[in-house]
Amino acid sequence: MIKDVNSSNARNYRPRLLDQKLKDTLKYAPAVVIEGPRGCGKTTTGIQAASSFLAVDEVELADPSSGAMRGLLGQEPPLLVDEWQVAPGMWNAVRRECDRRGGKPGQFILTGSSTLPDSSIRHSGAGRLAPLRLRTFSSYESGISNGSVSLGSMLRGESVDAAADLVLTRIALAESICRGGWPVSTQMPLEQALHYVEAYVNAMCSIDIRRSADVAPYQSTDTARIVLRSIARNIGTNASISALARDTSAGESVSPLDRKTLPAFLDAFERVFLREDCWPWGFRPASKQAMRSTPKRFVSDPSIATGILRVGPQRLVEEPEFMGGTFETLVMRDLRAYADANDAEVRFYAESGFEVDAVIEDRNGAWIAVEIKLTCNHVALNKAKRALKLLAKRTREAGKRPPSKLVAVFGVGAKDDHVGLRIAREEDDIAIVPLAALGP
């Protein structure tokens, strides 16, 4: 389908953190590729910056020649090319058209819910197509957080002081986890949202993963579900490939997957943006320690884990360990979105004896360390303080730049505990921030 972009879409649009970065990137890049999981809002976001629209999955490409492709791309720029991967030749057609137009910026916006396996016929697009990642709604974008504590301000070392009522009940947080940040599910009654998420993950396993896996024997719907359940059970851990392979038989009527087979499915889940591991950080840019460590396993939205395991909000509250893992997934999703808005990236720190859940570092080397705890009580707060201060000590002993801020992010308060979580504050050189206050 080829059509002009109209203003009706803009009237109902919920702003995204990526909006400004998209506009800025179009000022220097000939084309931008917005990538992310299906249903996270890529097309709707891309339309806000586009002048024309091409739905590749609705166009009959009887003639896939470069000339025919070029004819489809001759609309007013920026042209949004939606679901480009449906016609793999579209990538090279856009690249060539960028060259033909002399590398002029702001010509195309591509959106895609999956990446293609590496191919000798697909050019990298380096210098023409700039990638941007869109995730599901962060807590700030969906309104769960008021954003009164800015990640950007903490990277600048500014003080944390947000005197606002920021309490979340445990069941409300569980509902947010199970509902997920999908634009559609955030607008539905809870029960409908739970069914939507469950149908979503089943469709991804039965349709999208089969399309993405590039080795025919691995295109099994049942096996894809088994792998995703294993990832969900190990969420937030450093489970190795071997450990995940062994775990695929946990509670399943199958033998463990071969450790050579499992990576094909992991790659497939990464190609459709359902899996987003977190990689380690070293306070030296070329740290070998960071390269040797195993990544932490995450899915791109916490509802993927609860959906594939069929865990609803009430049951999630009754499973505090699993709820802790899904809460960490939610916070990591948020931190990644807020970091992107500040030209920073999110990693984690681990060494023998202790670990810090997240380290956010910008291009100039400013960084903050974040510990993520579901419940704000004395035990959790003291554990967070110890880990954060130990990391600060390690960097100080190495003569490296100290952190701009040490942060503990909590989800809910504890019953009969006087620690309190109604406002963000600084205590003992640690910023204590409720999820409901954290923003970009």
Image: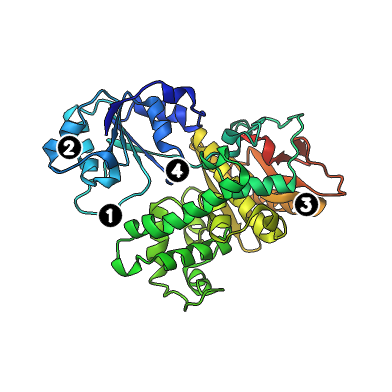
Residue annotated with mark 1: 118
**Closer to viewer: mark 3 or mark 2:** 2
Q: Does residue 426 appear to the left or right of 438 in the view shown?
A: right
The amino acid pointed to by label 4 is: Gly
The amino acid pointed to by label 1 is: Asp
Separation of residues labelled 4 and 3 (CA atoms): 39 Å
The amino acid pointed to by label 3 is: Asn
**Closer to viewer: mark 4 or mark 3:** 4
Q: Residue at x 52, y 66 (%)?
A: 230
Question: Disc 4 on helix, strand or loop?
Answer: loop
Return the x and y of residue 14 as percentages of the image width and height: 52, 29
Mark 1 neighbour class, 10 Å CA radius: few under 14, some 14 to 19, many 20 or more: few
* Pick the front one: 401 or 335: 335
The mark found on residue 297 in the picture is none
Residue annotated with mark 4: 39
Question: Disc 3 on helix, strand or loop?
Answer: helix
Vertical position of residue 234 compared to residue 370: above or below: below
Q: Does residue 366 appear to the left or right of 321 in the view shown?
A: left
User: Mark 4 or mark 1: which comes first in sequence?
Assistant: 4
Q: Which image quarter is the C terminus in? A: top right
The mark found on residue 69 in the picture is 2
Q: Does residue 158 appear to the left or right of 278 in the view shown?
A: right
Return the x and y of residue 137 as percentages of the image width and height: 54, 39
When asked about the image quadrant of residue 185, the answer is top right
Separation of residues labelled 2 and 4 (CA atoms): 26 Å
Mark 3 neighbour class, 10 Å CA radius: few under 14, some 14 to 19, many 20 or more: few
Residue annotated with mark 3: 382
